[in-house]
Image (cartoon, grey):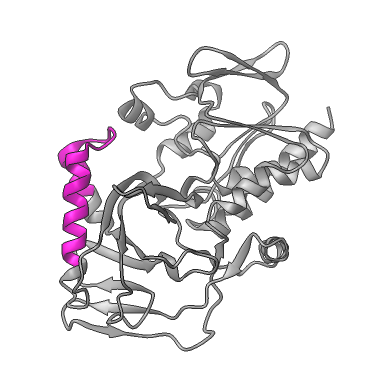
Amino acid sequence: MVAVSGAVCASTLARNGVSVTLFESARGPGGRMSQRRERTEDGTELHFDHGAPFFSVSKSEVLHLVQEWESRGLVAEWKEKFASFDFHTLKFNNIEQEGSSKRYVGVPGMNSICKALCNESGVESKFGVGIGRIEWLHDEKLWSLIGVDGQNLGQFKGLVASDKNIVSPRVAEVTGRTPPLDIKLVPELSEKLLDLPVKPCFIVMLAFAEPLSTVPVKAFSFENSEVLSRAYCDSSKPNRSTTSERWVLHSTAEYAEDIIAQTGLKKPSDITLNKVAEQLLQEFQSTGLITSQPFFKKAHRWGSAFPAASIAQEEKCLWDRNKRLAICGDFCVSPNVEGAIDSAFAAALRLKDSVSSL
């Protein structure tokens, strides 16, 4: 999956003269930085940032890149106040002061960043192409990639993976296929990935015909709820359509784990997703703030998207120098967009130096 770490790494390598071929099984890039496009029964098109709702930056190297994106019109600051809502008191707490922290969003959607990076000079992007098997050709010292359909996708001097499940048995549980990379090829790196704990999350996308005028903020976390962790008004972000008011609700990890324990890791059924959508909406309505019914609601599951640990905080990526394999992502540094970008920089630097010395 081409998350922001993979896209930033590809772009960084290309800018340093390394030609990159990028493979993604989905129709477009983004991972948790993707945008969901939905249609209502009457044909109305709705867009939702159904993964990362925003990102913040503290490191100067990452900030420099984000400022470049801002100058290119790929990101903008989301200047809404955030707060928390307590289900015990049914009141908002800690409503922010103006300008207390900068939060960035992609424009016109979170996926705009990855889309732009994957189209840069020196990056050849192949979407809708899943990797079924990754083989190391010992004599040639090259990586060989085979698609899920058995097609030979080429041989490469170096390899970067931004999917933490590349060696994980979770792949078999979800898809029925074996993981693309054999643990025996990179045992030390694999061991770190296999021990990586993850947190699941369900999200529910809602669209209302009228603004929720009784809600004083456009983004808030929840206290004392076993079901909801956060809510974001997607349509309040810059350069978004305002023909409807769209909200994205995030479940707690505990709620998601409970549903997965009942239904398994395979793709959830429509029955399960409809049940989740109804339960999260009911919890949202039980705040007493929501009086109208949404004209659209749909749930999505992030089964293992959120890492619960960082496995390479000093090195910032996993790296096998002999085989020129880098594994990068937010699971290496910190579980957020900035961590993913920081890890991508580290992977690109190692691979650039390694490939250029050949």
For this view, does 265 lie left or right of residue 78? left
**Residue 198: x, y in percent?**
36, 47
Q: Which residue is drawn at the image coordinates 83% and 34% (left, top)?
A: 356
Q: Nearer the viewer, residue 230 or 253?
A: 230
**Residue 340: x, y in percent?**
56, 52
Task: Please say whether residue 168 is visible from this viewpoint.
Answer: yes
**Residue 284: x, y in percent?**
21, 67
For this view, does 115 lie left or right of residue 165? right
Q: Which residue is drawn at the image coordinates 53% and 69% (left, top)?
A: 238
For this view, does 121 lie left or right of residue 165? right
**Residue 186: x, y in percent?**
55, 27
Q: Is residue 147 above or below residue 202?
A: above
Q: Nearer the viewer, residue 118 or 337?
A: 118
Q: Nearer the viewer, residue 125 or 251?
A: 125
For this view, does 206 lie left or right of residue 25? left
Q: Nearer the viewer, residue 129 or 240?
A: 240
Q: Which residue is drawn at the image coordinates 53% and 57% (left, top)?
A: 109
Q: Quadrant of residue 223?
A: bottom left
Task: Please say whether residue 57 is visible from this viewpoint.
Answer: no
Residues drawn in magenta: 257-283
Q: Which residue is drawn at the image coordinates 54% and 54% (left, top)?
A: 333
Based on the picture, tell me whether residue 269 belongs to the magenta stretch. Answer: yes
